[in-house]
């Protein structure tokens, strides 16, 4: 499940719980695209509670297909919580795409 909790200009806050479905990801990428077109580079703040990955191959395919394009639309990404593997993956992303300010907190 992915739910936006705050939207203001180029700042989007959302929470991720359980598994992300293809429907969750379609709605997420649509919101990201609309906000980017309206406000430019985005600041994303995510809280991950009991995140357990992706619900099936369809969801994983959407993630792999859309995530690289998202990287050009983001100025900063802040993660609060989440499983160990997810926090480490986000930290690695910060090293691979240094133009995005990445912060990770337990």
Image: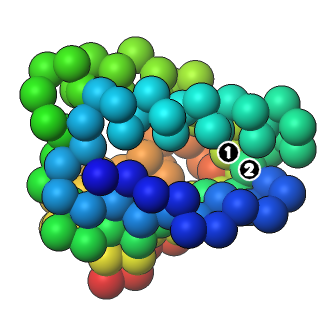
- Image position, residue 7 (x, y; %): 71, 61
In the visual, does 30 lie left or right of 39? left
Quarter of the image where the C terminus is located:
bottom left
Residue at the spot 68% in from the left edge and 30% down from the top edge: 33
Question: Mark 1 or mark 2, which has the lower sequence index?
Answer: 2
Q: Is residue 48 above or below residue 66?
A: below
Residue 94 in the image, given as x and y percentages of width and height: 49, 53
- The label shown at residue 74 is 1
The reply, left or right, for residue 95 in relation to residue 20 is right
Q: What is the quadrant of residue 4 in the picture?
A: bottom right
Q: Is residue 63 visible?
A: yes
Q: Nearer the viewer, residue 86 or 15?
A: 15
Query: Contact (CB < 8 A) between labels 1 and 2?
Result: yes
Task: Classify mark 1: helix, strand or loop.
Answer: strand
Residue 103 vertical position relative to residue 99 in the rendered view, above or below = below
Q: How is the image coloured?
A: rainbow
Seen in the picture, residue 50 relative to 99 is either above or below; the reply is below
Residue at left offset 30%, top offset 28%: 22
Measured from the top left, where is residue 74 in percent x and y? Answer: 67, 45
Question: Which residue is at the front of the view, 58 or 100?
Answer: 58
Q: From the viewer's perspective, is residue 54 above or below residue 82?
A: above
Q: Residue at x 45, y 57 (%)?
A: 3
Q: Secondary structure at mark 2?
A: strand
Please rate how many residues cluster around mark 2, counting C-alpha atoms within 10 Å: few if below 14, some from 14 to 19, many from 20: many
Position of residue 2 measured from the top left corner of the image (x, y, whole percent): 38, 53
* Corner quadrant of residue 85: bottom left
From the viewer's perspective, tell me whether residue 90 is left or right of residue 8. left
What residue sits right under mark 2 in the picture?
A: 42
């Amino acid at each position: 499940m992915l739910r936006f909790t705050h939207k203001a200009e180029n700042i989007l806050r959302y929470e991720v719980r359980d598994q992300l479905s293809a429907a969750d990801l379609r709605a997420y990428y649509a919101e990201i695209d609309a906000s980017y077109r309206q406000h430019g580079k985005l600041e994303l703040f995510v809280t991950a509670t009991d995140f357990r990955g992706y619900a099936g191959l369809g969801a994983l395919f959407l993630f792999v297909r859309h995530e690289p394009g998202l990287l050009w639309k983001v100025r900063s990404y802040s993660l609060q919580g989440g499983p160990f593997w997810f926090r480490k993956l986000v930290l690695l992303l910060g090293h691979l795409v240094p133009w995005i300010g990445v912060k990770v907190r337990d």
